[in-house]
Image (spheres, rainbow, N blue to C red):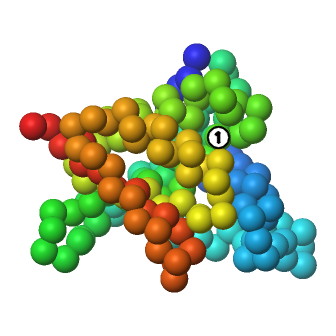
Amino acid sequence: MVEIIPASEAEHDRLLRNLYQFYLYEFSRLGPDWRVQEDGRFDESDLDDCWEPGCRRIFMIRVDGAWAGFIIVDLDLPDGDNPPVNEMSEFFVMPPYRRQGVGETAARWAFDQFPGRWEVAIVDSNAEALAFWRRVLARYPADPVAEVHRPEERDYLLAFDNSPN
């Protein structure tokens, strides 16, 4: 059973930081941008302000009582003259829970909790993640998914809108 648990700094900061190490380890296979520091850990500075009040929401993923990953979303980000956009900022499912529907369940839960315009950026060398997100987003037929390769960012940007009609 997949559970999505709203995270709090008091209860989940250490857990998030530990899982984040696995997340960055997964990225380390994609290129030299992700390397451990002198202390043998990956740089966690991206998490330094993650608990500040604002648009960021953090959720922990649990499967059959075991921690399996996390979701970090940024909500209602300004987008010029367009309506605000939600961003799937960070998303991680531990390898033992992949290809079992856990990731899709968690991603769809997040999208469904916060209807609106969404963007998901995927490192362009991460073919497995790109295939995953294409598969998940194909299930939102109300609005076609826009996909743009951004070579200068070294990523793909997938965008869709699941606002209620």
Q: Percent x, y for residue 14?
A: 69, 52
Q: Percent x, y for residue 15?
A: 68, 47
Q: Percent x, y for residue 57?
A: 42, 51
Left or right of 64: which side holds 112?
left
Left or right of 127: which side holds 105?
left
Q: In the rendered image, which residue does mark 1 sit on?
A: 93
Residue depicted at x 59% and y 64%: 123
Q: Secondary structure at mark 1?
A: strand
Asked whether residue 43 is in view, the answer is yes
Q: Quadrant of the C terminus?
A: top left
Which residue reaches farthest left? 165
Q: Percent x, y for residue 58?
A: 48, 49
150, above or below 54, in the image: below
24, above or below 65, in the image: below
Left or right of 120: which side holds 46?
right
Tag 1: residue type? Val
27, above or below 6, in the image: below
